[in-house]
Image (cartoon, rainbow, N blue to C red):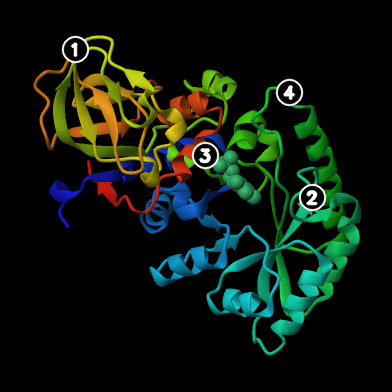
Amino acid sequence: MLKQNYRAWVEIDLAAIKHNIRSLKSLVSDSTELLAVVKADAYGHGAIAVSQAVLEAGATWLGVATIIEGVQLRNAGITAPILIMGATNSPDEMKAIAKHRLQPTICTIEQAQLFNTTLEDSINPLLVHLKIDTGMSRLGTDWRSAKDFIKIVHSLPYLKIHSIYSHLATADELDQSILHLQHQRFKQVINIVKESNIQPILIHFANTAGMMTDQNLHYDLVRCGLGVYGFYPAPHLRESFKSLLSLCPAMQVKARITQVKKIEAGTGISYGYSFIASRDMQIATVAIGYADGVPRGLSNQFLVKVGDRQAAQVGTITMDQCLIDVTDIPDVKVGDIVTILGNSEDNNADRWAETMNTIAWEILCGFKHRLPRLIIKR
Ligand SMILES: Cc1ncc(COP(=O)(O)O)c(C=O)c1O
């Protein structure tokens, strides 16, 4: 279907993604590689197109959460190393990982042993990444047990340790005490690696917030997600980094006006009449709703753009449609394009997240696949 027939869509600016990769890379030394986190369909942006763009711009690794996400990239012809950051515990999953040359995260000794027996007839050992839990309490072996974990995995003939990593729990917070504690624990693990003489091993620790907060966390590779998509992980990081690190949001969400009508003062709008017209108004119906990923909780609380003119969303957001106040934009007409989620500070994912008391990550991942992803060339 042609764009002119779409009711609503997501626009992805790959030039912005590439710009963000170059900006992020400028913060790390030449010896630190950049892994672009493209899980969850590249935070909703479209994993294949984003992966190709980030690799062209200088990222050398991709990170996904699931095997299916990794296989999708392999099937698209992507040959770069792909780290699966989620856990995989069944022999079938392990065989699929090996078959598609994906690289798994190993979280426990039991999981490593099962991988080893499952892959017994392979010719080459599988490259694996050991996850150490330094304080996130999610995946990985506790840092205090890292020595045995590393030693045992190293002894398994069908596995080859390619990296050791950990994940930060509070890197986007102003208070860095937990980050420092996690780093102290991780440094103990690095010493164990050094003493065990297992080479060469990549060490990695930082997400976007971690890499911005402390360059001592960069090590051999940084794993960046949010920054790739154009957002700073916290207001204080945006303030201190906006002149050093330029990030541009790559996603916009647009929809068409399907009807324009005049209503009298006192008229209720949409389900539940959460908005009553205080004056004679002109309102427009827009073909996007909560089933597309515009949260119902944003009803009556966000601004959209019709061309370059701002309009307030009014009334309860419904499953497939919502309404906007176009009283002051008298010339709007059916078919006009409305920018629902924009890329400027007054209407981007950060603004929505603030209103919804959530995070930009959740807003970006929330747009459903009912909305086609259109790559914008510029
Ligand atoms: C293990 C791991 N590393 C890195 C990232 C990227 O984090 P961010 O989007 O904050 O850069 C994630 C994202 O959740 C993750 O789970």
Horizontal and vertical percent for residue 21? Answer: 45, 42
Residue that label 4 marks: 175
Kind of residue at disc 4: Asp
Q: Give me the disc on residue 280.
A: 1
- On the question of residue 360 being in view, the answer is yes
CB under 8 Å between callouts 3 and 2? Answer: no
In the shown orientation, is residue 58 left or right of residue 81? left
In the shown orientation, is residue 129 left or right of residue 284? right
Mark 3 vs mark 4, foreground winner is: 3
Q: Is mark 3 within 8 Å of ligand 1?
A: yes
Q: Secondary structure at mark 2?
A: strand
Horizontal and vertical percent for residue 186? Answer: 80, 45
Q: How many marks?
A: 4
Q: Secondary structure at mark 1?
A: loop
Name the residue rendered at 36%, 45% in the picture: 292
Q: Secondary structure at mark 4?
A: loop
In the figure, 51 relative to 244: above or below? below
Q: CA distance from mark 3 to mark 2?
A: 23 Å
Residue that label 2 marks: 133
Mark 2 is surrounded, within 10 Å at the Cα level, by few (under 14), some (14 to 19) or many (20 or more) other residues, namely many
Q: Secondary structure at mark 3?
A: helix
Mark 4 is surrounded, within 10 Å at the Cα level, by few (under 14), some (14 to 19) or many (20 or more) other residues, namely few
CB under 8 Å between callouts 3 and 1? Answer: no
Horizontal and vertical percent for residue 322? Answer: 30, 34
- On the question of residue 246 being in view, the answer is no
Kind of residue at disc 2: Asp
Q: CA distance from mark 4 to mark 1?
A: 50 Å
